[in-house]
Image: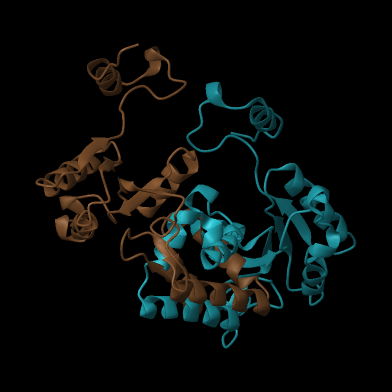
Chain colours: A cyan, B brown
Amino acid sequence: MIDQLPHLSQLLKQLQRVPYLASKNIYRVAHHFLSLSPEQMRQFCEVLHTAHRELIKCPRCCAWQERAGNCPFCDSLRRDQTIICVVETWHDLLAVEKTGGYKGAYHVLGAALSPLEGIGPEHLSVAQLRSRLDNGTCREIILACNQTPEGDATASYVARSLDGTEVAISRLARGLPVGATLEYMDKLTLNKALSERRVF
Amino acid sequence: MIDQLPHLSQLLKQLQRVPYLASKNIYRVAHHFLSLSPEQMRQFCEVLHTAHRELIKCPRCCAWQERAGNCPFCDSLRRDQTIICVVETWHDLLAVEKTGGYKGAYHVLGAALSPLEGIGPEHLSVAQLRSRLDNGTCREIILACNQTPEGDATASYVARSLDGTEVAISRLARGLPVGATLEYMDKLTLNKALSERRVF
């Protein structure tokens, strides 16, 4: 039936490329867009276009910033530039930022190493990270990679790349999440919590 | 942090209005759009605009059709126009169509009655449905509303609106879904299956 509606199939094809849209919901989202008023439609596309034009990656930390403004992390005097939290993606940066407990700088690698997906070291912004250490301001780097095989490999790679620099390298604590009961915890996490136990 | 990036917050606001995009994923979808090449971005907006311009609701059955073409349901000689399947939404039409077992016409009401959401009889395309019966072609109407309180109310309302017409009115069978085991079936369904039992 859809093949008799070429404009609809093209719309569905475009929506299929949007991540995190379940294929089951694509028809409903298409229906939503088709049901918009011409004015709402114009506005949606304009906002999309403008955001695409006006937001760029910060050349230092690789997070999104306004083309006509400053990076909210690198150029803020209220943030401690002696410490850099290295994250895989921009969403990870937002997750750390939402805790409200971190006031240092960030560095977005852009991805995690994943040979299966064809993501190698050349896809990570490690050269930019190294060049940020040249002026000697930074004293500590926190490797805040995900606790996945890809995240572990990425953290090891970044740590090795920083060999020969004076900077201290740390990583996020591993162990029981807040609210966890030992009974329902997986073996690997409980093992880590045991082996990396801290003085009470 | 986001409030320092006005173009980003506007983009997020627009994406929040898209249904079936979990708010947790909006940042990832925004990142996806910002990372598109200018050419991909242009193409996405163009396809959206063109689809919005070229697809209209069929004035008879209210399903989407090409502005420059025929309705794939109303104007098809291969479909039985003596039977009309009445559904709440276009997605429901697609669900019936995917079964491959129905070759009649459709009628999309546009919504289900829902006083809580402010959806009253004036929002349903029941007048169009009645006018389709005037030429006497249609002999049966299948009320294929959802098995929800709203769907039941809608089906009753449509059935009452058709009082005085010659057409036969049926509804979808209720009972155990294929693959169901009695043990795990909810009471209401099992009750319906009992009270609406059929000759073996």
Check the image and report above or below for A118 versus B148: below
- As rendered, which of B141 and A2 lies closer to the eye? B141
Answer whether residue A67 is visible to the viewer in this image: yes
Residue A57 in the image: x percent, y percent? 66, 75
Quarter of the image for residue B194 reads top left
Residue A62 in the image: x percent, y percent? 68, 71
Residue B165 in the image: x percent, y percent? 14, 47
Q: Residue at x 47, y 51 (%)?
A: A25
- As rendered, which of A58 and B107 lies closer to the eye? B107
- As rendered, which of A102 and A147 lies closer to the eye? A147
Q: Residue at x 53, y 82 (%)?
A: A50
Check the image and report above or below for B95 versus B187: below
Number of marks drawn = 0
Answer whether residue A78 is visible to the viewer in this image: no
Q: Is residue B95 left or right of residue A13?
A: left
The residue lying furthest to the right in this view is A164
Q: Residue at x 20, y 59 (%)?
A: B131
Q: Is residue B71 left or right of residue A196?
A: left
Q: Is residue A65 left or right of residue B195?
A: right
Quarter of the image for residue B74 reads bottom left
The residue lying furthest to the left in this view is B164
- As rendered, which of A142 and B68 lies closer to the eye? B68
Quadrant (top left/top right/bottom left/bottom right) for the C terminus of chain B: top left
Check the image and report above or below for A97 versus A36: above
Check the image and report above or below for A100 versus A68: above
Residue A174 in the image: x percent, y percent? 65, 40
